[in-house]
Amino acid sequence: MEEKFEEENPSWADMLPDALAKIFSRLSLEDKLAVIPRVCRRWKHISQDAVCWQSIDLDEWSRSRSPDTIERMIKMLVNRSSGCLREFSILSLRSDATLCFIARSGQLLQVLRIPYSGVTDECVCQVAPKVPWITYLDISGCASLSKVALQAFGEHCRSITHLKRVMYPQISSMVSSNDEEAFAIAQHMPQLKRLEMSYGLLSNSGLKAVLERCTNLEFLDLRGCWHLDLEENFIKECKKRFEVFHEPVGENDVYYTHDLDLDASDCYSDSDLFSDMWDSESDGIGIFMHEEEINGTLYFWPDTSP
């Protein structure tokens, strides 16, 4: 009876390495780095397989880490991906060199999410040819990027269908309109289906160019684009044309785009594992950290001991 039960219900230890790797790939960052390797040597070895690191999401984890620690983590995980990296997400990437390092292993990269990063146009011109299969690109708040970066991505990454370029709230009376980025998008990214340009400086001319060239658009977010002066009939036509259309808001309206409102949920799923950590920090409660050394590398996690 026991033998029959074991045959019908094989143990985890008997599962094929490829199957375990696929399961591990769906776990949180902390589980893959600090939990799974401690179960047994076999699981530790499998957790380092490239399949487990095709998707790397350091967004939440990186928010309370030093640049040096972030740099070490990126290099280790990207190396583990062994050229199979398909999704990469981080908030505020600090240097051009790091993005170039990621791109060298990103020939298969489909999702690149680097909002509020300090990367430059020069770096993007080098990186774009190395990541031709990107479909989702988030360069929101990257103040050092301009039409040059958009042109580079558009020319070399013909598969981009979702562009997120949400900028900082601007006061239109203090900042003049600028259609350069809108013109670059219209000329070099006509295949777009989703475009998010909240708080962009585009005017009616830039919007016209985008609408004329990007005929496949299904989602358009223009909230906070205060330089746009759209007639009511035009707005009605846009609502008919697009599955989702967010019109601009007035200068006196209080509005901001939260990063979680418009995410890449179609491309990857975020983990809520560290949400309590950020809530505690915002409340002024100190987070006691401890160090754990795994494979010669230090990781810093919240102290969950009683």
Image (cartoon, grey):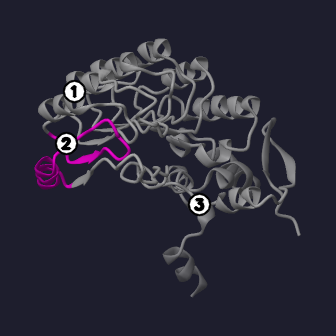
Position of residue 202 in the picture relative to residue 173 (left or right): left
Q: Give the residue pinned by disc 1.
A: 186
Position in image of residue 204 (x %, y %): 22, 33
Task: Specify the amino acid type for callout 2.
Answer: Leu
Q: Give the residue pinned by disc 2.
A: 217
Foreground residue, 286 or 167?
167
**From the viewer's perspective, is the residue at label 3 or at label 2 nearer?**
2
Say which residue appears at 17% left-offset and 28% top-offset.
209
Q: Is mark 2 on a helix, strand or loop?
A: loop
**From the viewer's perspective, is the residue at label 3 or at label 1 nearer?**
1
Say which residue appears at 74% left-offset and 40% top-offset.
65
Residue 272 shows which numbered tag?
3
Position in image of residue 9 (x %, y %): 53, 75
Task: Specify the amino acid type for callout 3.
Answer: Asp
Foreground residue, 150 or 173?
173
The magenta stretch spans which residues? 216-243
Q: Does the magenta stretch include residue 227?
A: yes
Position of residue 237 in the picture relative to residue 24 (left or right): left
Q: Does label 3 or label 1 sit earlier along the sequence?
A: 1
Q: Is mark 3 on a helix, strand or loop?
A: loop
Q: Is mark 1 on a helix, strand or loop?
A: helix
The N terminus sits in image quarter: bottom right
The residues bearing labels 2 and 1 have C-alpha atoms spaced at a distance of: 11 Å
Foreground residue, 38 or 305?
305
Q: Does label 2 or label 1 sit earlier along the sequence?
A: 1
The residues bearing labels 3 and 2 have C-alpha atoms spaced at a distance of: 31 Å
